[in-house]
Image (cartoon, helix red, strand yellow):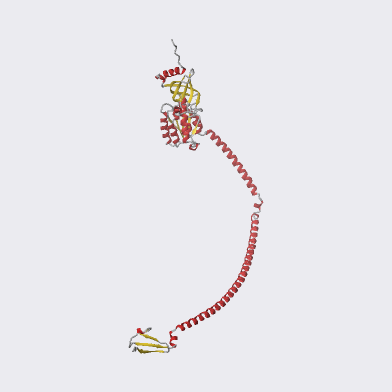
Amino acid sequence: MDKRYLTVTALNKYIKAKIDNDFQLQTILIKGEISNLKKHSSGHIYFTLKDDSSRISAVMFSNKAKKLNFDVKDGDKVLIEANVSVYLVTGSYQLYVNTMEIDGIGNLFLKFEQLKKKLANEGLFDDMHKKKIPQYPSKIAVLTAYPSAALMDIMRTIKMRFPVTRVIIFPIPVQGKDAYIKIIETLRYVDTLKFNTIIIARGGGSLEDLWNFNEELLARAIYECLTPIISGVGHEVDFTICDFVSDYRAATPTAAAIKATPDLNEMITNLNNQQSLLIANMKHKIENYKNNLGRIQSFYLFKNPEKLYADHLQHISYLQDKMQYELFNQFNKKKSQYMNIHFILSSKNKLFINNIHHKIENNSFLLEKNFKNKFKQNQDQLYYIISKLNALSPLKTLERGYAIVSKNNKNITSIKNIKNKDKIEVRLKDGTFQAVVDKE
């Protein structure tokens, strides 16, 4: 009987088919710790998921990995949804991861970091928005659990440091589901009561215990308050979103009470020190003034008071003489300048008048000469025109024996213009006469 041998590929395919057809392996929920993490340039993530006793290879492809809301790293404890299959090339089975999130406390811490980053980017933690804590408050509101060790620490500290201030307690739930809603309601109410300072406090605890003080709505309510707020939530190592958004973060409830109040004993001590220093300074000042007064009283000028003003009188006389001298010099200088200017103007005036007279005489001579020449030219031209007119005058023609014949004051130039028996007028060189036309 012939034996049939399988190839490695065929065996791996068979095992892969068996696993792929197992319904329970197609969607599994598994938790563990990440190790051997490798992030490929393609965006795929390769890692080993392990617990205390075992490990399994896993891959998360880029289309799934880009949906992660945290930066996965070695040592992270995670919760995974995946399916199991076989990688044919190596014959090893592995997890094909669909979703991944931080396990337990890690998930809460991730939410804390994400909210912290979000609010920081919006500016809720900026120092420019922090209100100054009043140095000498008359009224303080304390929001905390009642009764609680945190409240006792706050009250004891305030009474010891500044017992004159009025403290009013507003009980709030400091843990439990939706406790932050009651905290917000109380905080907004207290903010309307015109307190100098508000302290929000509770004792230490786990991240889950303190989670109400990490809620976004509470952070925004604190940011919107008009009253300065001191956060005294948890112990020194505990940090909450409430700490970052408040106007001051105290490491403990006791530290919050210390920040909210001055130390009355220290104030009294400082006041006594200041009083002693002031008295010493006053005595020193008085002594200095007495010494100065004694020196002034013994000053020689006070024994000879006329010397106080003698020098000034002499100086005034000197200034008067100097002023008169300066005025006299200025007057002489101005007078000399005036005489020089007067002389210069007089000389220039005579020269100007002489020049004008000379110009007038020359212009008169030229005008008379031009007038005579023009008159002679016009006279000669007149004689010429008269001679031409005489040459053309009809009177000159009459002197040569010609006559001018007219009828009804119209000159007759043709025989056709007259008829027989017409009366005409004949003008000769020395007179006129009447005639009758006779054409026969």
In x, y percent, where is residue 185?
41, 32
Could you tell whether 202 is left or right of 422 in the image? right
Query: Which quadrant: the C terminus?
Result: bottom left
In x, y percent, where is residue 287?
62, 43
Above or below, 81 relative to 122: above
Above or below, 227 relative to 352: above
Please name whichever residue, 422 or 387, is drawn nearer the observer in this view of the structure: 422
Asked if residue 369 shows in the view, the reply is: yes
Above or below, 225 relative to 13: below
Asked if residue 162 shows in the view, the reply is: no
In x, y percent, where is residue 267?
53, 35
In x, y percent, where is residue 307?
65, 55
Q: Please, which residue is most extreme toward the top here?
A: 1
Please name whichever residue, 339 or 348, is drawn nearer the observer in this view of the structure: 348
Q: Please, which residue is most extreme toward the front here?
A: 440
Could you tell whether 70 is left or right of 325 in the image? left
Identify which residue is drawn at 56% across, 78% down. 369
Query: Which quadrant: the N terminus?
Result: top left
